Amino acid sequence: MAQYELLLPKMGESVAEATIIKWLKQPGDMIELDDTILEIATDKVDSEVPSPIAGKLVKQLFKEDEVVQVGAVIAIIETDADAAVTPAVENAVETVVPQEQAEAVLPGIPGTEQLLSNDNTEGASKQGSDRFYSPLVKNIAAQENIELSELDSISGTGAEGRLTKDDLLNYIQQKTGGTQKAESAPVTTAAASQPAISSLKAAPAVSVSGGDEIIEMDRMRRLIADHMVMSVQNAPHVTSFVEADVTNMVMWREKVKRNFEKRENEKITFTPIFIEAVTKAIKDFPMINVSVNGTQIIKKRDINIGMAAALPSGNLIVPVIKNADQMNLLGLTKSVNDLAVRARNSKLKPDETQGGTFTLTNVGSFGNVMGTPIINQPQVAILAVGAIKKKPAVLETEYGDVIAIRHMMFLSLSYDHRVVDGSLGGSFVRRVADYLENWDVNREI
């Protein structure tokens, strides 16, 4: 008999660790090829880990709710093979986003990004110490000028005494007498996202009456709450609004949608049109496509657009269209439809919710005319598109001004005032509106 070491598989370029949610197989259970052994969760999607080999599970090396690094041995499987084999870290996982655990975001508020990772350390480093520190803990320590020797002296409440984010934040609060707030660690890689850091301010007392129902936040909701608080604390938000006459765009879609659906076997929505306008405007104003790392501005080479997609549960997740500026309208339409369908069917891969450089959220799908969305860190801007409404509008003609019924919509851009001033933010959202207003009604697709 041989023993097979099951490793925690790689789930994306920037995913360094995962939490074990549930063991579906227990020691002594027989396992067939591709049987699901356990469920794991990153801070973006939940996944199932299938067995790459048949045999008997003899040992679980981690308990439920423990955080495990990518590539770590998580279980031992006894096989009939002549020799033990060790799988590569690149093992495939089948991504599953259960409805009750899917990432929930409010209209106009995109989903949280992955925990901060460091490509040079592959998500974990000991840096000369025998104690493990996650990239998140290390970057908070660097932000607060805490040396490794000082970290070693802090007691941890995690598995095997591991120092958690909360342990470090509590230590910082005590060290500073509760007068300082621990800021989120800066971004260290282009693909990494800002970590979610809870406010250290004491929460106001909440009165509870006998008839009130107390609902404990699940893991995803707590993550979202941290991320939203961090974003507001970290970035001074400003929102600029523009009203656009999109009559030509609406008429064009009405004209082509039936033939398009018949030819391509899928529908064309307004979302790819909005994304195309955004990518064109980003090329005109590239400083809207940046991130902030301390005092550094990281100008992104790629234009990766995140879009809000509704899940059957009523929640939203934000898949990302990579290199959206390199696609034509047909390609954008197919990408939008594909990601939306797979999001609803819980088939998104971890990489497909990461690496966004700009986010688009359609509050109009909920009947809202405008919104003031919260920036999806570490991005510096997010655009909300409102509902398209028929309104009387003044048109200038060669015969004078006239009042006509037009299709109108509001665009609202929230941006980080540390690096995006009103001139840039206002000019950008105006340019997006210009591309939509000047739509060619004779365009072919």
Image (cartoon, helix red, strand yellow):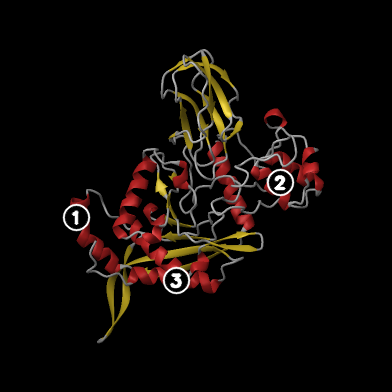
**Residue where numbered disc 1 is placed:** 258
Q: Residue furthest front?
A: 82
Q: Residues within 10 Å of mark 3 (few under 14, many from 20)?
A: some
Q: Is residue 155 above or below residue 253?
A: above
Choose the circle earlier in sequence order: 1 or 3.
1
Mark 2 or mark 1: which is in front? 1
**How far is mark 2 from mark 1, CA to CA?**
56 Å
Q: Which mark is residue 202?
A: 2
Tell me the SS state at disc 2.
Answer: loop
Can you see residue 372?
A: yes
Q: Amino acid at mark 3?
A: Asp
Q: Position of residue 163 (x, y in %)?
A: 71, 37
Graded by Cα atoms within 10 Å as few (under 14), some (14 to 19) or many (20 or more), the crowding at tag 2 reads few
**Mark positioned earlier in the residue sequence (2 or 1):** 2
Q: Residue at x 27, y 74 (%)?
A: 404
User: Looking at the picture, how far across and down is residue 445, in whole percent?
Assistant: 24, 61
Is residue 101 visible in this depiction of the protein? no
Which residue is drawn at the image coordinates 48% and 39% (left, top)? 45
* Circle 3 residue: 284
